[in-house]
Image (cartoon, rainbow, N blue to C red):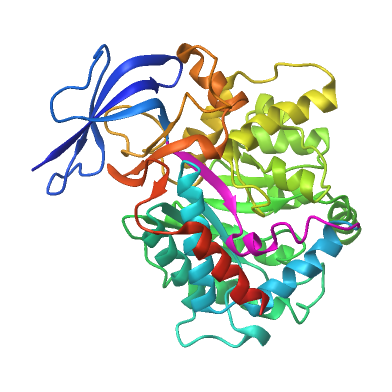
Amino acid sequence: MTETTYWLEHAWLGTDVEPGVTLTVAGPGNPRAGRITAVRTGTPAPPPGAEPLRGLTLPGLANAHSHAFHRALRATAQVGSGTFWTWREVMYQVADRLTPDSYHALARAVYAEMALAGITAVGEFHYVHHAPGGTLYADPNAMGEALIAAAAEAGIRITLLDTAYLSSGFGQAPDRHQLRFSDGTADAWAERCSFLKERDHARIGAAIHSVRAVPAGQLATVARWAEERRAPLHVHLSEQTAENDACRQAHGRTPTRLLADHGVLGPRTTGVHNTHLTDTDIALIGGSGTGTCMCPTTERDLADGIGPAVALQRAGSPLSLGSDSHAVIDLFEEARAMELNERLRSRTRGHWTAAALLRAASADGHAALGWDGAGALEPGALADFTTIALDSVRTAGPLPRLGAETAVFAAAAADVSHTVVGGRHVVRDGAHALVPDVPKALAEAVAALRG
């Protein structure tokens, strides 16, 4: 049984930055293969046989909310006027063109871009299930399998959050774009999902697209499917005030109360966005231990608003982060933006420490995706970590001991030099080891969808 040893010039160990840290990772044949077996501080030089990682090493980052195909909209959907609802029409045009093969090619490139940004796990909120018009593929999970394969080929972990999407609004059938999203009923959704199998790099979770997309009487079916499997359950929640208004009109209560009344909230559930909430909503989310995934770069891009992240966390809701529509893939920017957005709203500073923001981008994100043994540089954890350079034009200057602050308030995805997943280099010296030319792969995949 072999081991791999890494020497980290500087490492963030959850609270402080330590210089000269040696990590040992179990190799193939070991029951703990791909996990950290030892962490030793106070090693000023690389031990014999150790691979040095110069810079600041952090736990791998977790992108807790992704729609991989939205990457094809970058720099096209950002221009012009309108709202979330007009943007959605543009998004549907891309969704209409996806096939299992084209989605695999795009997702592989997008996940490779994530690895280059230090992301080692992604939560893929997946609802493009069927062919246009709703016809099932020969394998009803062909699209989901394409995403799972894409993550493997890009070298990162995935939690496929297979999404129930059954209606276009309260009491309304799916429109022509949404037919390929729908299984007809939650029971049919659950039957299809049951054929998806977990793998070493893949977890299977569930999602409710939104309260407008799953009839109230079928919410419990999705929640029960996740509960029986102890799987994560995610849901878009109160992203738009129009959805809140429609929910009150249809059910006489807020989306949060509707989810609570049907058993959806709880410690394995994560509400994505959680933007337009009442004080009672916040208490329901926090009191149930339901998580909150903030996606600041998308929320500002779509003019959604600024969610009450501080109040949610104080109420007991763990925070995670996602790049959602991929206008930007940069978890450092998401972490920084959550703090800076709150400063704009409150006109006060310092709502989270840099360490707390990094935990949201790493350990708490992994927990939201069902990867509880990840997001920390400690014995027993998955050997998933990323290194950022401390000598770029963005990171040069701060003292190395200010590692968390440098990562959150100075670094960018472009500063990632190494990404290791399961003890294996996926990104080395800024180059992806499995996808030779990520920009070319992205350009070709996006061009194929644009036609």
Nearest to the observer: residue 357 or residue 240: 357
The residue at the point 47 percent across, 37 percent down is: 416
Q: Is residue 117 visible?
A: yes
Q: Is residue 400 magenta?
A: no
Q: Nearer the viewer, residue 269 or 376?
A: 376
Q: Is residue 344 left or right of residue 123?
A: right
Corner quadrant of residue 134 = bottom right
Residue at 17% x, 22% y is 47
Looking at the image, residue 227 sits to the left or right of residue 92; the answer is: left
Residue 225 in view: no
User: Per the image, is 63 magenta?
Assistant: yes
Please give the name of the residue rendered at 27% of the width and 15% of the height, measured from the top-left corner. 41
In the image: residue 287, left or right of residue 382: right
Give x and y (percent) for residue 103: 54, 71
In the picture, which quadrant includes the C terminus?
Answer: bottom right
Residue 293, percent from left and from top: 63, 42
- Which residues are the magenta region? 60-81
Badge count: 0
Q: Quadrant of the N terminus?
A: top left
In the image, farthest residue toward the left: 1
Q: Position of residue 345 (x, y in %)?
A: 84, 27
Give the image quarter of residue 155.
Answer: bottom left
Image coordinates of residue 290 in percent, x first then y, are: 61, 40
Foreground of the two, 259 or 339:
339
The relative height of residue 353 versus residue 120 in the rendered view (above or below) is above
